[in-house]
Image (cartoon, rainbow, N blue to C red):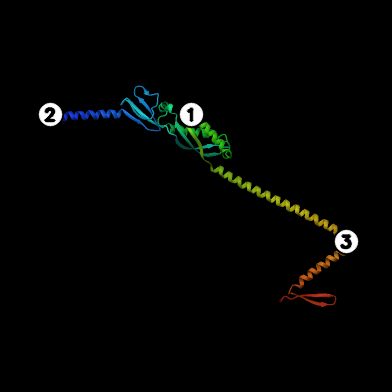
Amino acid sequence: MGSQAAVSFLTNVARAAFGLGAAATVLNASLYTVDGGQRAVLFDRFRGVLDTSIGEGTHFLVPWLQKPFIFDIRTRPHTFSSVSGTKDLQMVNLTLRVLSRPEVSRLPYIFQHLGLEYDEKVLPSIGNEVLKAVVAQFNADQLLTERPHVSALVRESLIKRAKDFNIVLEDVAITHLSYGMEFSRAVEQKQVAQQEAERSKFVVMKADQERRASIIRAEGESEAAIMISSATSKFGSGLIELRRIEAAKEIAATLAKSPNVAYLPGGNNMLLALNPSR
């Protein structure tokens, strides 16, 4: 009797443990948790996706019949690149960074039409579309000189385009802009040509100044010759003789200081001899 009672007791304990385990399993399958910065969309096998999203906290569902899908609603960065053509047919490499989040009230619609990876499906596509449309309105050099205006147009167009997909863009910025090799080479050649033009302009200005200086110098010499000719005709050749004597004195003073010159008196003339040994 004692052994039968023990067996019966153990059987009851096992049944109770099994029942508790099954109940715990069912309870665990009936609960799900939505963390901070997240929202849940509930899928029902009979009714489909429910129209309302579920906020933070622990919630109940019907096991097997319902299944939760968790969305991250925090603002997240996305970066993508695009190669676009400008108005003057130059290729430009652009990198765009956006901060995006889903519109919380439209999460069921987003899940039905785009799924959990909605941002990876939508943002690169509309980003390239907007960049190509905006860049095509400007010449290559205008992208640098009017960069704030270009960024504003890209931001405005992309925010409006993302709204069609129930995506909110907190910020849009062009982080990188570079040109193709052909345009960079053309810019370099243009700079070289501008430098050559400036150098040629300087050479022309220098030649013009030298020409003007020559004209002024010639005019001065002509006026001096006229004045000397006038003075000679009016006062005789005394001025010329005076200039000849002054020049002779300067020559004599220069020769007197030279160690290779010897003076030999000879009547009214003075014989000069060079002494190459010294």
Q: Give the residue type at disc 1.
A: Lys
Residue drawn 50% across and 35% down? 172
N-terminal-most mark, 3 or 1: 1
Q: Residue 163 carries which label?
A: 1
What mark, if any, has residue 152 been given in the picture? none
Separation of marks 3 and 1 at Cα, in angstroms: 101 Å
Where is 13 relative to 254, above or below? above
The answer to whether residue 225 is left or right of residue 88 is right
Residue occupying image coordinates x 73% and y 52%: 209
Amino acid type at mark 3: Thr
Q: Kindly identify which numbered label has been placed on residue 232.
A: 3
Choose top left, top right, bottom left or bottom right for residue 149. top right
Q: Nearer the viewer, residue 35 or 136?
A: 35
Q: Say the numbered circle drawn on residue 5.
A: 2
Given residues 190 and 113, the one toward you in this image is 113
Q: Nearer the viewer, mark 3 or mark 1?
A: 1
> In the rendered structure, which amino acid carries the disc numbered 2?
Ala
Quadrant housing the N terminus: top left
Which of the two marks, 3 or 2, is nearer to us in this view? Answer: 2
Residue lying farthest to the left in this orientation: 1
Counting from the top left corner in percent of width and height, residue 151 is at 54, 36
Label 3 crowd (10 A; few <14 / some 14-19 / many >=20):
some
- Residue 41 x/y as whole percent: 38, 27
Drawn side of residue 69 relative to residue 94, left or right: left
